[in-house]
Amino acid sequence: MAFSESMFLNLSTFSSRSFASFSFSMFRFSFGVGVGFDGVFVGKHPTFNQ
């Protein structure tokens, strides 16, 4: 019983950690894409390009 409980606890902590890292990587990817898009847009925009 204790073995299965510890296994379940380890599995749940591992899944939560992997989910957190996955969400963080997705957030970083979307943030990088947004910043790159803004940089391209600002670079092509005539008013910001001085």
Image (spheres, grey):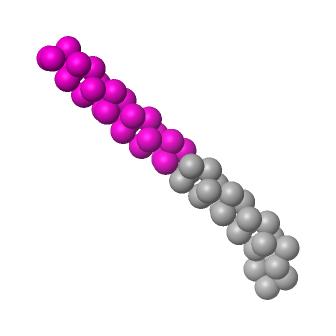
Indicate left or right for 6 with 36 as reference. left
Q: Residue at x 20, y 23 (%)?
A: 5
Report x, y in % for residue 48.
Answer: 76, 80
**Picture quadrant of residue 19:** top left
Residue 2: percent from left, percent from top: 14, 17
- Res 50 seen here: no
Give the residue drawn at x 66%, y 62%: 35
Residue stretch in magenta: 1-25
Q: Position of residue 22 (x, y in %)?
A: 51, 42
Where does the C terminus fall, quadrant-wise? bottom right
Is residue 30 left or right of 3 when viewed as pictured?
right
Q: Quadrant location of residue 6?
A: top left
Residue lying at the far left of the rendered structure: 2
Q: Residue furthest front?
A: 1
32 within the magenta span: no
- In the image shown, does 20 or 50 lie closer to the viewer? 20
Q: Quadrant of residue 16?
A: top left
Q: Is residue 25 left or right of residue 12?
A: right
> Does residue 4 show up magenta in the picture?
yes
Q: On screen, 31 above or below 18?
A: below
In the image, residue 30 sits, relative to residue 15, either above or below, namely: below
Give the number of marks.
0
**Residue 31 visible in the current orientation:** yes
* In-image side of 28 versus 4 (left or right): right
Q: Closest to the observer: 36 or 46?
A: 36
Q: Magenta: predominant secondary structure element?
A: helix
